[in-house]
Amino acid sequence: MKGLLIKDFKLLKSQKNFFVIIALITAGMPIYMEDSSFIIGYMTFFGSLFTLSTISYDEFDNGNAFLFSLPFSRKSYTLEKYEFGLIIGGIFWLFATVIAIIAEMTKNSMMIKETLMTALLMVPVMIFLLAIMLPFQFKFGGEKSRIAIIGAVGLVVVTGLAAVKIAELFHIDLAAVFNSLPAMGMGMAAAAGIGITVLVLLISLKISVGIMNKKEF
């Protein structure tokens, strides 16, 4: 497991110039944006995608045939991808959160608490994204998985829009409901979201292990 993590980090190290550019862009975003919390969502999603790129690297030129001749199980390989995704996503999330908070402090903004709440709510979103994306990547590979992921995300968006329309039909102001929640309530919501998405992630891991065990290289 440790060797697999080292391998994936070395793969990312080869793209260090790209990471430097992304870091500079992220640091410069608050200059042109009023709401710095957008940076947290953007960077968290962006960081999670790097796990998919490492799987594509492993599959390139039938590399899995050699990779799985090494002394580790397919379950260990699958589990490592989930761990790597959480680590990289967490690093990007932390970096973006620090940048957003510094930006709000520099502007003497009163939105620091809201930014922290947004950061907390982005943690279950990151976990959910990994839970959705990784099984598709293992099952369909690089190109087909993108189509499947877009379809899954589209389904989530449509579901969200449907919920908003239903709320409007019953004259429920969702914005007012969320704004009326105290900070403690938002923290509890974030904690509950993390708990639920961790359960979804475990189910996703089991599905991915099943997919990898059935694959032939």
Image (cartoon, grey):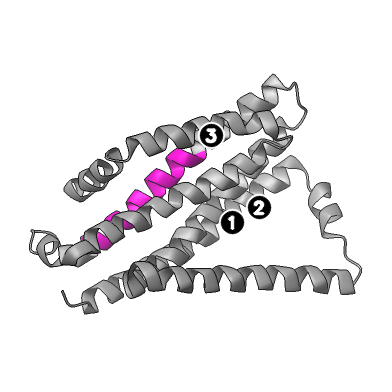
Pick whichever, 181 or 23, lies toward us: 23
Relative image position of residue 125 (x, y in whole percent)? 56, 55
Relative image position of residue 156 (x, y in whole percent)? 61, 69
Q: Quadrant of residue 66?
A: bottom left
Magenta stretch containing residue 91, yes or no?
Answer: yes
User: Which secondary structure is most common in the magenta stretch?
Assistant: helix
Residue under label 3, please give it: 25
Q: State how far apart marks 2 and 3 are (Cα).
A: 31 Å
Residue under label 2, please give it: 189
Q: Quadrant of residue 172?
A: bottom right
Magenta stretch containing residue 111, yes or no?
Answer: no
SS for callout 3: helix
Q: Which residues are magenta?
A: 77-93
Q: Amino acid at mark 2?
A: Ala
- Label 1 with label 2: CB-CB less than 8 Å: yes
Q: Which mark is residue 193?
A: 1
Q: Is residue 79 in sight in this rendering?
A: no
- Label 3 with label 1: CB-CB less than 8 Å: no
**Mark 1 or mark 3, which is nearer the start of the sequence?**
3
Pick whichever, 168 or 217, lies toward us: 217
Instruction: Please rate how many residues cluster around mark 1, counting C-alpha atoms within 10 Å: few if below 14, some from 14 to 19, many from 20.
Output: many
**Mark 3 or mark 2, which is nearer the start of the sequence?**
3
SS for callout 2: helix
Q: Amino acid at mark 1?
A: Gly
Select label 3 or label 1 by which is in front.
3
Relative image position of residue 166 (x, y in whole percent)? 81, 74
Q: State how far apart marks 1 and 2 are (Cα).
A: 6 Å
134 left or right, relative to 164 = left
Pick whichever, 173 or 54, lies toward us: 54
